[in-house]
Image: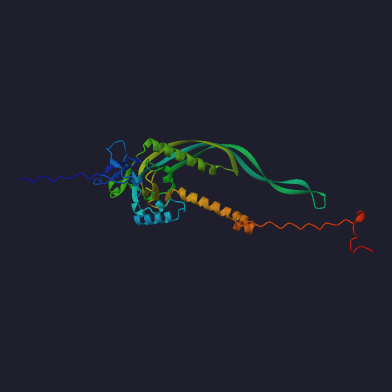
Amino acid sequence: MTPHPRVRFSRAPVQLECETCGASLRVEADQRTAVCPYCASPSVVERPPSNDRPSPHFVLGFSMARESAQGAVAAWLGKRSLFVQSSVKKGTIDAIRGVYTPAYLYSAMAQTRYAAQIGENYQETETYTTTDDKGNTVTRTRVVTRTEHRHLEGQHATYVMDVLVVASRAVQNAELEAIEPFDLRTMRRYTPAVLSGWVAEEPTMTQAECYALARREALAKIGRDLPGFMPGDSHHGLTHETRLDQETLELIYVPLWVLAIRHDPRKPPFRVLINGQTGAIHGKAPLSWVKIALAVLLAILLLAAPFVLAAARDRDPAERRGVARPPAPAAAPAPAERARPGGSRPTPTGGAR
């Protein structure tokens, strides 16, 4: 009997899409379902493959272990405000997951034309008159600083590099900026083996969206750096226009430790992002309005307590006991004087003789 050849099943990773936040996760072939690390939602379904998604160019590996990330998150949660919801502080840190998140690395050559009013400071000695302590008019000198302004136009060329923008709809670009920078010196070429055993998300933002986002960041960076390039002692009225050339946009994976806690089924999950290289943490813990209301009420009571005590001290002790105070006795009337015959009054005793 001729033996049948062994059948080899494909072990290629599959794409799972989260129905809640839209993340597209790359998981191992034997993992057909998953809990989304970004929103802690179990509603993750397999999505069909597509050819319009570019292959990643580079990968930044994890240099922070899971235990270190858990310890950093526990310490971070312990320092949150007293008004944070108790369910968040009691949330388990065992749910933390390591995720390779897609991002685009943008570089370009920038040519900027600018115009501004440049101020040059100089000093001169001037003579002035004043009145001394004796009331005499005296002439004195002093050194004053004056500014001369001149119009300046020119060009500024620079190479904008390492602008990182997120390519995932599950993560806001501001969240990624909050935990930057990443150590790009450890960047290496992408191979599927690098992501083996990790959850990796496919880009869910188009290249055009990420390109526009990266250009805005690059132009904003030039606008922040250009004032430092201006000569002179001061400047005002700076205007500029930049043209970007030789642009490159490369898809990379950045390492994130993600902790998502569903503290309320009616609200979005509380999420903490940790830079998988440096340990930088970003998250906004939800506040408990019940705790805030109780704190406000307690503050009002503490502020009103001195006035209530002062008013109580000013009250009569008898009134505080609820006993009516007896009325004061009326003064006795003065004895009436008897009239003498003839209408004369009696001579008072003790008078002059």
Most extreme residue toward the left is 1
Q: Is residue 95 visible?
A: yes
Residue situated in front as seen by the camera: 4 or 281: 281
46 w.r.t. 258: above or below: above
Left or right of 248 on screen, residue 238? right
- Residue at the far right in the pictured view: 353
Taking the spot 41% from the left edge, 38% from the top edge, the residue there is: 247
Q: Residue at x 42, y 36 (%)?
A: 212
Q: How many marks can you see? A: 0
The residue at 37%/55% (across/down) is 70
Residue 55 screen position, x and y as percent: 31, 41
Rendering quarter of residue 317: bottom right
Task: State the colouring used for the structure image.
Answer: rainbow
Q: Nearer the viewer, residue 333 or 39?
A: 333
Q: Residue 57: x, y in percent?
A: 33, 43
Q: Nearer the viewer, residue 207 or 112?
A: 207
* Quarter occupied by the C terminus: bottom right
Camera-side residue: 95 or 313?
A: 313
Left-right relation of 125 to 86? right
Residue 284 image offset from top left, x and y in percent? 44, 48
Residue at horizontal 48%, vertical 40%?
220
Residue 152 x, y percent position in the rendering: 58, 37
